[in-house]
Image (cartoon, grey):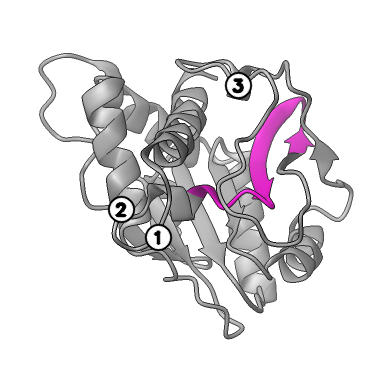
Amino acid sequence: MNRTFVFGFLFCWMLFSVPGISQPVKLGLLKYNGGGDWYANPTSLPNLIKFCNKNLNTNINPEPATIEVGSRELFNVPMVHMTGHGNVVFSPTEVSNLRQYLESGGFLHIDDNYGLDVYIRREMKKVFPELDFILIPYDHPIYRQNYTFTNGLPKIHEHDNKPPQGFGLIYKKRLVCFYTYECDLGDGWEDPEVHNDSEAARTKALQMGANIVSYVFNQ
């Protein structure tokens, strides 16, 4: 493990939590190749950040950074969010970069915006060939941060009448990737006029998103 990367993450977390430090930490939006719409929910991550800063008293830059999978800029953010509907392709260089990022303390949240599942499972198998996505139990801390979700993920949008499920990749006993499936959290984070969601559904989506952010900074 490269110490420079570890120290970079520690510095980001210090910026997040130490009073008197004005520069906020950034979260990332993952830009990937393959033709999928990585940009699908432009208002979702900024709205989640706004919710966290207001309700969790966090100090996160209101504008997330758009970061390509193979970029070294990935190591400047403690958490990167990924979404979309279609194809995803990671090159060998991107596979290596993403794995090093996750091994070094980074965290990836994948939100299936409907149609991502088959592609992201294939590509994440390149990143961690030795790992499989496992269903995260309802008593996991990610569901019990500032907000408690006793039945796991909230269902924001209906697609195939499947229950929402949270899957994870566990590397050396650490959850490095959380994959929200059949849930559409990101749609629930978007501006109210984008989707015809109830205020209750949007609140649940934002609270669960805040739990993910809180988990990343507290693990």
Using the rendered view, name the quadrant where residue 35 is placed. Answer: bottom right
Q: Residue at x 48, y 18 (%)?
A: 147
Looking at the rendered image, the disc whose residue lies closer to the viewer, 3 or 2, is 2
Q: Main secondary structure of the magenta part?
A: strand
| Relative to 91, residue 64 above or below | above
Residue 57 is situated, as x and y percent measured from the top left of the image, at: 24, 20
**Span shown in magenta:** 169-185
Q: CA distance from mark 3 to mark 2?
A: 22 Å
Q: CA distance from mark 2 to mark 1?
A: 6 Å
Q: Which image quadrant: the C terminus? A: top right
Which residue is nearer to you in this view: 16 or 62?
A: 62
Q: Which image quadrant: the N terminus? A: top right
Residue 146 is situated, as x and y percent measured from the top left of the image, at: 45, 15
Tally of marks: 3
| Relative to 85, residue 173 above or below | above
Q: Are marks 2 and 1 in contact (CB under 8 Å)?
A: yes
Neighbour tally class for label 2: few under 14, some 14-19, many 20 plus, Cα within 10 Å: some
Q: Which residue is mark 2?
A: 192
Residue 68 is situated, as x and y percent measured from the top left of the image, at: 45, 68
Neighbour tally class for label 1: few under 14, some 14-19, many 20 plus, Cα within 10 Å: few
For badge 3, the amino acid type reads Phe
Q: Residue at x 42, y 34 (%)?
A: 200
- Taking the view exactly as shown, the residue that stands out farthest to the bottom is 35
Neighbour tally class for label 3: few under 14, some 14-19, many 20 plus, Cα within 10 Å: many
Secondary element at tag 1: loop
Residue 101 visible to an observer of this rendering: no
Q: Residue at x 36, y 26 (%)?
A: 13
Q: Which residue is mark 3?
A: 149
Q: CA distance from mark 3 to mark 1?
A: 23 Å
For badge 2, the amino acid type reads Pro
Which residue is nearer to you in this view: 87 or 162?
A: 162
